Image (tube, helix red, strand yellow):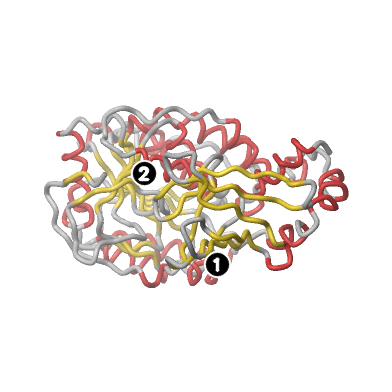
Amino acid sequence: MELKEFEQTIADLILTTKWEWASNDGTCEVDFTGTHIVMKENLFPYIITFAESQNTLLLHLFKPGSDETLAILKYEGKKLRWFGRSFEGGYIQIVPGSNVHIWKKLDNPLKYMREEVLKQAPVNYIDEIPMDHIVPEYDIRLDFPDFDKIIHSECCVALIACDRLEYFIQCMQALALNSQAKEWPVFLFLDKPTDPSKDINSAQHIVLLKEYFPDSIVICRPTNFGAGKNIIDARRQLFDYLHFDYVFLIEDDVVVAPNYLETMVNLWSWLVKNNYKNNVGVIQGWQYNISEQPSSYVEINIDNLWAYSMSKECWDDIKDLVYQYEKDYLFSRYNERPHRTIFKWYDTILVSPIREGYPASETKLAVLKGSLNALQTNQESCVLNALYRRGWLRLNPKVNLAENIGRSGIGKSTDYDNMSFEAIKLQTADIESFEESL
């Protein structure tokens, strides 16, 4: 293996690893991009070299906006860290939080280069997954041919559910407190459980929904679509066939605040008024980093895609990528999708510049770009990838108007705990006008 190819292998490994940065200023999570380390929204340029004389990897860290060296860190394989002293005093160490079994081998890079990298061979990962899961095509207009004559609304709510009735009850109780939900069409895309014994849950879902929203429309899947196909097809029906301008998509394990929809409507109105709608395609009221007090400031969101609203203009621009993902990678059970092949496909999608309009700082845009490296292979990550690579932004107020309560289903209870979702509680805010937070 040539040294250049080896260094590229190391670069790829760095970009797919979670890291923690520790210094005399404290500890925080960091992201590596292709050219910068992102720490607390500060960008530090870096390069990685392999010192053959020392048989080790070196990380050269530079001051932001300068060619001046901040530190040179040496990789210490036995301690699983990059370590060095800052030229400004104190120490710096960067510790990998994942792929540790690979990083242990880098204690001897030459051995890794010769014995591990050379063994790698091209694999067609798609062949690992049998094409055994086909769902029938559906067109909502066949079941509701007079829909456009009886519904006169630019916006609707799409609920996504399957067999988690205990969550759906809480989701419905919270949504019903939003007066705006009573003025819009409400659709339930109810997937068929894989376990036939849970079919009774479907009937209970419908009864509960009709108690709160008597005029709601229920689409019962005749077979198990899986969460990915169910959500993608919900957008197909509502945007492509029924031509709604905006869709609020809420999954069954998300609880929203009583003023959630009203605040989001106000945010869309503010975006339209300020001519930001041509580059902001998604808004939501859930995020990790909330203010101590509800705030009218908005910011670019790079967190999970939950309880959000998308515009038709945005969907029309990204749907070809989402439909390609659906066609090429969701041909089997949702939890058996070919992860490595999807990651390779992500890298082939050209990145468009952020659309002109919304005033965002270069630092925030760099953080946004760096977040692409942390995306997974589910439909949510596919949408986020398509969104950002086509130049669209996603905004939210600096308040938290939604809460995730899901501990069962596709995700795992351990994921819920590790991501600290339980600590992110609902706030309430009735915001009519907003301000940019650059």
Image: 94 above or below 52:
below
Q: Nearer the viewer, residue 438 or 379?
A: 438
Q: Position of residue 67 (x, y in %)?
A: 49, 39
Task: Look at the numbered disc 1 and give the secondary structure of its residue.
Answer: loop
**What's the residue type where badge 2 is placed?**
Lys
Q: Residue at x 64, y 45 (%)?
A: 48
Quick one: quadrant of the N terminus? top right
Q: Position of residue 35 (x, y in %)?
A: 54, 40
Q: Nearer the viewer, residue 207 or 394?
A: 394
Alpha carbon of mark 2 to alpha carbon of mark 1: how far?
30 Å
In the shown orientation, is residue 126 left or right of residue 87? right
In the shown orientation, is residue 144 left or right of residue 47? left
Q: Residue at x 79, y 52 (%)?
A: 55
Task: Look at the numbered disc 2 and give the secondary structure of its residue.
Answer: helix
The quadrant where residue 357 appears: top left
Q: Residues within 10 Å of mark 2 (few under 14, many from 20)?
A: some
Tag on residue 98?
none
Tag on residue 412?
1
Image: 6 above or below 318:
below
In the shown orientation, is residue 408 left or right of residue 296? right
Residue corresponding to mark 2: 364
Q: Nearer the viewer, residue 210 or 88?
A: 88
**What's the residue type where badge 1 is placed?**
Lys
Q: Residue at x 59, y 52 (%)?
A: 72
Q: Position of residue 302 (x, y in %)?
A: 40, 49
